[in-house]
Amino acid sequence: MMHSPLSAQLDEALQANPAMIGLSSGLEPLTLSLASTRVTGAARPAAIGAPTLVMLHGWQDNLASFHALVPYLPREWGLLLFDWPGHGLSEHKLGDYYYPFYDYLDDLHQVLHQQRFSGPLILVGHSLGGLVASCYAAAFPDRIAALVMIEALGPMAEPAQQITNRLAKSLDQRLKQRQKRQRYFDSAFQALQLRASINKVAAEPLLPLVARGLMETPQGITWRHDPHLRGDALYRMSPAHCESIIRAIHCPALAIRGTYGYPALRSQDAQQRMHGFRQLQVVDLPGTHHCHLQQPQQAASWVTDFVTKIQTRT
């Protein structure tokens, strides 16, 4: 059976040192101990006074989501990336744990308090990472110099009257998922093709992310991330809570939307949200929800210009 060059690259990546899978050049792996788990990450130090970008990946992704952006960012800037608990190479949280949104804020808080930053701190989040970043910037306005949200615009919210339906559906979903078996693939390339189909992204840009997200077991190849992540949230904040958070974000913010990304980012609600930010720039990047993987050079260029202008003003 003939293997494609992409399949061979993926197989080679899986045989490498796991801590190095999906890391761009210049990043050094690190492990951080949190209160209830350990997370795996990567970093490079900033030049004195230069900003540090803390890059937060999305749901069921991992830090390799930013693999392609790193080479296009200024070399003197510091970078800190990590796999959220239950994602990538980070440990899963123990027990029947379902990763509620607010605990991601606690995880980020613990990670940041273990690091030293000589210059401005910039949060860059994709999807879930952008939701977390926006809430953190609101909670600690004096610590965050700028906020970049890729396919995100503040936290998710829904009308308060939907809470009972959400509770019922999510609890029933958990019962079904506890009985669901782990999925295994015949090859890593099969998993890559599935992910490409779901995310509507070509296979090649997804390779580092998928390689870091897979593991080989006696039963076959499967995803590393915690199966509990598939459960829908039992609770979502109300629009009033979301508005309060957005209005508490004091720093400049950049929102990068995929032209074929999350439809809610182009809704009337999104337009109203935009008015709540004190300083917001919105740009559209050709691509889907993972547009930063499809157009990494352009995404990095916008981030660089945005952060550079902030530094110039300060």
Image (tube, grey):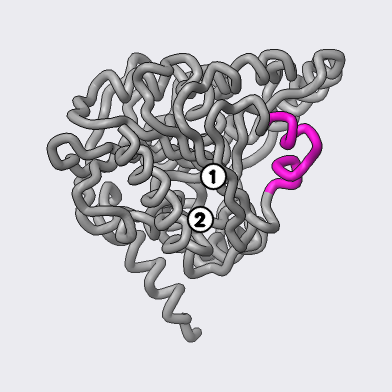
Q: Secondary structure at mark 1?
A: strand
Can residue 310 be spotted in the picture? Answer: yes
Residue type highlighted by circle 1: Ile
Q: For residue 18, which numbered disc appears in the image?
A: none
Q: For residue 292, which numbered disc appears in the image?
A: 2
Residue 225 relative to residue 20: left or right: right
Residue beneath the point at 64% across and 57% down: 288
Residue type highlighted by circle 2: His
- Pointer 1: residues within 10 angstroms few (<14), some, or many (20+)? many
Residue 24 relative to residue 179: left or right: left
Q: Is residue 226 magenta?
A: no
What residue sits right under mark 1 in the picture?
Answer: 150
Q: Nearer the viewer, residue 83 or 291?
A: 291
Residue lying at the far front of the rendered structure: 313
Residue 249 relative to residue 308: left or right: right
Q: Nearer the viewer, residue 62 or 305?
A: 305
Q: Quadrant of residue 176?
A: top right
Q: Is residue 268 magenta?
A: yes
Query: Is label 2 in contact with label 1 (beta carbons under 8 Å)?
Result: yes
- Asked if residue 40 is positioned above or below residue 188 in the image, the reply reads above
Residue beneath the point at 13% across and 37% down: 48
Residue beneath the point at 35% across and 60% down: 14
- Asked if residue 1 is positioned above or below residue 271 in the image, the reply reads below
Q: Nearer the viewer, residue 172 or 141?
A: 141
Region rendered in magenta: 262-273
| Residue 136 x, y percent position in the rendering | 47, 21
| Residue 211 x, y percent position in the rendering | 42, 57
- Pointer 2: residues within 10 angstroms few (<14), some, or many (20+)? many
Q: Please, what is the dominant secondary structure of the magenta stretch?
A: helix
Of the image marks 2 and 1, the number of the one nearer the N terminus: 1
- Asked if residue 279 is positioned above or below residue 137 in the image, the reply reads below
Q: Quadrant of residue 185?
A: bottom right
